Amino acid sequence: MIDGQGIPGARLRAATGPAARDGRGPPPSRDGVRVLLRGRRDAARRPPAAGPEVAGKPEYFRRATCASFQMDGVPLTPEEFDGAMSRLKAARACRTRGALRARNHVAILVRIETMLRRGQALQAAEVVRWYTSIACGLSAGGIAAGALGRLDRVVTAVNSPRLRFWPAVQEVAALHVGLLDDPFVPGFNGILARLLLRFHMGRCGLPPVVFDPEADPPRVTSVSKLEPRLLELIAQGYDGNGQT
């Protein structure tokens, strides 16, 4: 559940408080953190990619979209994704609802990367637009008034992230698991939570990650399992072998 501050309270306190290690796995080794921080510095020195695909490559948008949809049980074929990306008028006219969702998801990812590059803060109203854009009129219902207040508080937390590497990973993992446990919306919960995860990680200076839709679903519902998985994916991102 999300507490009165709008952050998954018990998990976030366990992740960042004095008793951070109680009942959980050990923090990464000092050498392991040092390697990741070195990768972070090396990545920061690289020149930005040219063009609008500021996350690195169009392949990232494809992988992130297809994996996220698959994790929520929303079918998306490669043909639908290719059709969604087509700029031909005929292709636009023949888009399926799945292809439209894919196109909107990619547009959100591009928007997120642009906001991160410009240092823009996230607004709760923008998250609501993400939800309605992905739902494409087939959502199970609107966002309740009480959920909007919680969303405001979560967005505030995302906009004010921890910048030290390990506390940042802990906070990201705790917030993500909390959002899956106590979602804002009646449908497309995981997709929306993963978009927020990307923005949160970007505000922490961390690279984008793409979950494995077959292996990762059990990991993303547990902070103690998600933290080491995020470290793996972050390391892959810094090596250039993962998400970008």
Image (tube, helix red, strand yellow):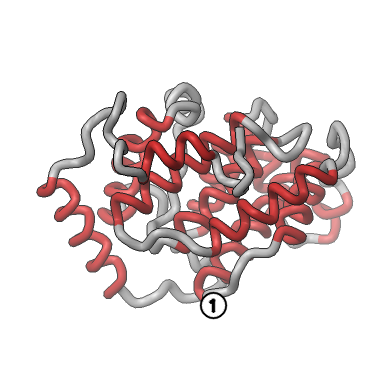
In this rendering, would 154 be left or right of 84?
left
Give the total number of marks visible in the rendering: 1
> Residue at the location (31% across, 38% down)?
20
Pointer 1 local density, CA inside 10 Å: few below 14, some 14–19, many at least 20: few
> Residue at the location (36% across, 29% down)?
224
Residue 65 drawn above or below residue 104: above
Q: Amino acid at mark 1?
A: Arg
Q: Nearer the viewer, residue 50 or 2?
A: 2
Q: Secondary structure at mark 1?
A: helix
> Residue at the location (47% across, 31% down)?
220
* Quarter of the image where the C terminus is located: bottom left
Q: Nearer the viewer, residue 208 or 124?
A: 124
Estimate the x, y position of residue 65 in percent, counting from the top left. 59, 44
Estimate the x, y position of residue 104 in percent, counting from the top left. 73, 53
Q: Which residue lies most toward the left here?
A: 31
Q: Quadrant of residue 122?
A: bottom right
In this rendering, would 89 be left or right of 161?
right
Estimate the x, y position of residue 18 in percent, counting from the top left. 30, 42
Residue 60 drawn above or below residue 204: above
> Residue at the location (84% across, 46% down)?
145
In this rendering, would 125 be left or right of 137?
left
Q: Nearer the viewer, residue 4 or 135?
A: 4
In this rendering, would 23 be left or right of 138?
left
Estimate the x, y position of residue 46 in percent, counting from the top left. 30, 73
Task: Tell me the residue that label 1 is attached to.
Answer: 118
Q: Quadrant of residue 193?
A: top right
* Quarter of the image where the N terminus is located: top right
